[in-house]
């Protein structure tokens, strides 16, 4: 998927919602079996219920990899069910030496044809380049995350006055362009978007932390939006686990619709 197509979908729907399919098999509604078939049935119902309100789905691969072969099969079936109009993200946070990264890229861009993958930049340029070799695919690099541990490294001040996360974003942005690169920026410190937008005014940002983690959609939009909107705001648990009953899909749709309505109001 190209950046322009994603922008067009956001404009058409007036929504920049990304639904996170962090499907914990232990949290499936009681009427569904806790196995591959249950996960697939759950995910398909969530997708069908929320597709009108979002432009993207993010599959957190850990919840599927932990189930072995059955989990991979569930992930493949889930990805195949997502409409082609929706931007698909493998939230895999990969990053290794070049030949290993090339295999990760093949896994998530060819074998499982996602539009994007999240990667960790700690090992530097040669660990990112294999992902950037794919045209019309996006590499989403961890920039400033919303977890408490981001203070350990990401928020360390460098001798030149920059924070480490600012230096990472600036360097990575020079390796490609907004047609191939996005960055993860957590929603819990929205004021940081101001400085980040000075570094990367034209890139899309994948924003976790709204909803269950307490981030403000209004503040993220205020400080993070650019001329193309430039945001994919992810909500996972708040949507997919809105209900643990047989009406889980209907309740997920209500939550997604509410997010979309708020986004439309903020864009207008």
Image (cartoon, rainbow, N blue to C red):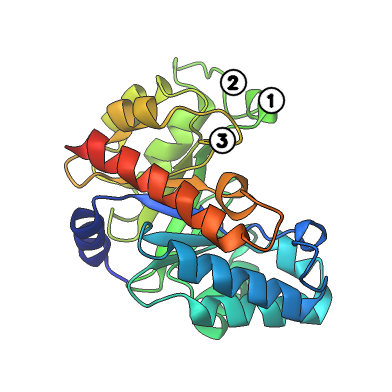
Considering only vertical position in the picture, is 219 above or below 69? Answer: above
Cα–Cα span, label 3 and label 2: 13 Å
Per the image, the residue denoted by label 2 is 156
Considering only vertical position in the picture, is 140 above or below 138? Answer: above
Quadrant position of the C terminus in the picture = top left
Spot occupied by residue 253 in the image (x, y as percentages of width and height) = 47, 56
Whether residue 205 is visible: no
Cα–Cα span, label 2 and label 1: 7 Å
**Secondary structure under the numbered disc 1 in the rendered image:** loop
Per the image, the residue denoted by label 1 is 152
The numbered dot on residue 145 is: 3
**Secondary structure under the numbered disc 3 in the rendered image:** loop
Spot occupied by residue 151 in the image (x, y as percentages of width and height) = 64, 23
Spot occupied by residue 156 in the image (x, y as percentages of width and height) = 59, 21
Which of these two is toward me, 124 or 54?
54
User: Which residue is pictured at 24% across the width and 44% down the height?
Assistant: 229
Which of these two is toward me, 55 or 256?
256
| Residues at circles 2 and 1 in contact by the CB criterion of under 8 Å | yes
Q: Residues within 10 Å of mark 1 (few under 14, many from 20)?
A: few
């Amino acid at each position: 998927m190209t950046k322009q197509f994603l922008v067009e979908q956001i404009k058409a729907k007036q929504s920049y919602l990304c639904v996170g399919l962090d499907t914990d098999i232990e949290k499936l509604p009681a009427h569904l079996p806790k196995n591959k078939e249950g996960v697939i049935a759950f995910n398909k119902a969530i997708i069908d219920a929320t597709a009108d309100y979002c432009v993207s789905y993010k599959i957190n691969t850990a919840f599927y990899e932990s189930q072995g072969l059955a989990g991979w099969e569930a992930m493949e079936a889930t990805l195949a069910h997502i409409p082609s109009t929706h931007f698909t993200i493998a939230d895999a946070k990969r990053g290794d030496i070049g030949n290993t990264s090339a295999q990760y890229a093949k896994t998530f861009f060819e074998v499982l044809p996602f539009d994007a993958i999240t990667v960790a930049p700690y090992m530097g340029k040669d660990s990112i380049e294999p992902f950037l070799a794919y045209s019309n695919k996006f590499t989403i690099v961890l920039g400033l995350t919303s977890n408490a541990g981001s203070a350990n490294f990401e928020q360390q001040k460098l001798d030149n006055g920059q924070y480490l996360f600012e230096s990472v974003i600036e360097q990575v942005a020079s390796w490609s362009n907004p047609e191939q690169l996005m960055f993860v920026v957590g929603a819990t410190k929205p004021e940081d978007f101001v400085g980040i937008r000075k570094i990367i005014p034209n890139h899309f940002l994948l924003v976790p932390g709204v909803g269950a983690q307490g981030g403000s959609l209004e503040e993220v939009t205020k400080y993070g939006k650019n001329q193309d909107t430039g945001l994919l705001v992810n909500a996972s648990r708040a949507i997919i686990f809105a209900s643990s009953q047989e009406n889980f899909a209907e309740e997920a749709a209500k939550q997604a619709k509410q997010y979309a309505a708020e986004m439309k109001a903020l864009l207008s």
